[in-house]
Amino acid sequence: MVSIIGGGPIGCYAGFNLAKHHDVKIYEEDKEIGKPVQCTGIVTNNIPRQIYSEDYIINKISEAEIISPNKNSIVVDLRNNNLVLDRHKFDNFIAEKAKENGAKIFFNKKLTGLNKNELRFNDLTTTDDFIIGADGPFSKTAKESGLFRKRIFLAGKQARIKGNFNSERMKIYLGIGSFSGVVPESNKIARVVSINYKNINEDFNRLLKLEKGEIIEKQGGMIPLYNPKLKISGGNVFLAGDAATQVKATTFGGIIPGLIAAEEFSKGFNNYETRVNKKIRKELLLNLMIRKKLDGFNDKKYNELVELFSQEKLRTIIGNYDRDFPSKFVMRLLLKEPRLLKFIP
């Protein structure tokens, strides 16, 4: 039997893959799937086909505008559209898929303790053979099993705003926090987000001055920085998603890496960590190296970077490859433009 802690998309996708061959129970801390929303909800089109649906996609992005501190900008045409998700529908779609395969989902179940096979919740004690922690950045599963170790977190703050937007174009503002961007849901509503280690309110207010609009609602949450030294399994416990810090450190998206990890459960538990690392460790590590370099940039460096990428040959490269796999395009960029070497870790 398998217990999965966390009923988000990563936990439910793990349940979807395991329920074909195991008795799976998914324990969700909240009273429903998909709320509260703590994610901007934009992904590449690398969602696994078995859980892909147009039903939860509310917009498709074909362009990315990257804006430097001196207000110069470049526009990148994306060969593959990025997808803007309705996170409530997306999470529930995967939960239903897991249930169709036989997984059972229990709500209002907060993990309070874990000792080998025994799990203690706020109102329940149970035992299971395998335990999966997909319970977010502050994973209680990781803490109780000794897998948490030292972690670094960033704060994310976002809002949905009414205004006038190009519905096909997302914006990325360099030099405002670690990451700041605008993701349109339509030509009238967009999601604006800032992410940083500290001073998040200051960054968020700077962004709102640039992207004026009526605030519909505010959201936010904490984001783990990828830690390549973490073990993501130990004994009968396995981690996936934010609980395993499987987040791209450049744009701080974690849905696709987490789903890739959760898909490995379709092959069972043997060598799970080795298989996951083979799939995504190189990509996450390269993202982390780039992030550490970017953290040292000032406005002048960002301005120089955007100026270099004004070349069509470079814009074409980054538009042709998904950001989930930077190893596929970083070397191509360096070969086309050796001056980028001073920006690369």
Image (cartoon, rainbow, N blue to C red):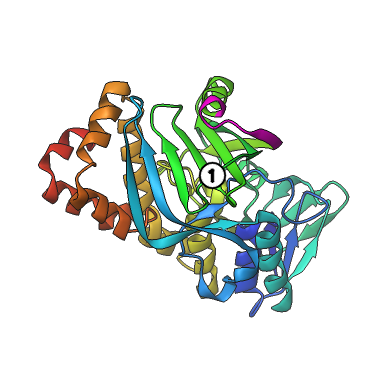
Question: Which quarter of the rendered picture does the N terminus lie within?
Answer: bottom right
- Residue at the image position 74 percent from the left and 66 percent from the top: 25
Q: Residue furthest right?
A: 123
**Label 1 neighbourhood size at 10 Å, few (<14), some (14-19), many (20+)?**
some
Question: Which quarter of the rendered picture does the C terminus lie within?
Answer: top left
Displayed quadrant of residue 302: top left
- Tell me the element at label 1: loop
- Residue at the image position 48 percent from the left and 43 percent from the top: 252
- Residue at the image position 46 percent from the left and 58 percent from the top: 44
Rendered position, 209 above or below 186: above
Rendered position, 196 above or below 275: above
Q: Which residues are magenta?
A: 208-216
Q: Magenta includes 339? A: no
Q: Nearer the viewer, residue 297 or 248?
A: 297
Residue 199 lies, in percent from the top left, at 54, 20
Residue 187 lies, in percent from the top left, at 57, 49
Q: Nearer the viewer, residue 101 or 300?
A: 300
Q: Which residue is mark 1?
A: 165
- Residue 131 is at least partly visible in this image: no
Rendered position, 251 above or below 77: above
Q: Residue furthest front?
A: 164
* Horizontal side, residue 110 vs residue 68: left or right: right
Displayed quadrant of residue 191: top right
Displayed quadrant of residue 277: bottom left
- Residue 107 is at least partly visible in this image: yes
Query: At label 1, which amino acid type do we have?
Result: Phe
Q: Nearer the viewer, residue 327 or 245?
A: 327
Residue 211 lies, in percent from the top left, at 54, 32
How many circles with numbers are drawn on the protein?
1
* Horizontal side, residue 173 vs residue 317: left or right: right
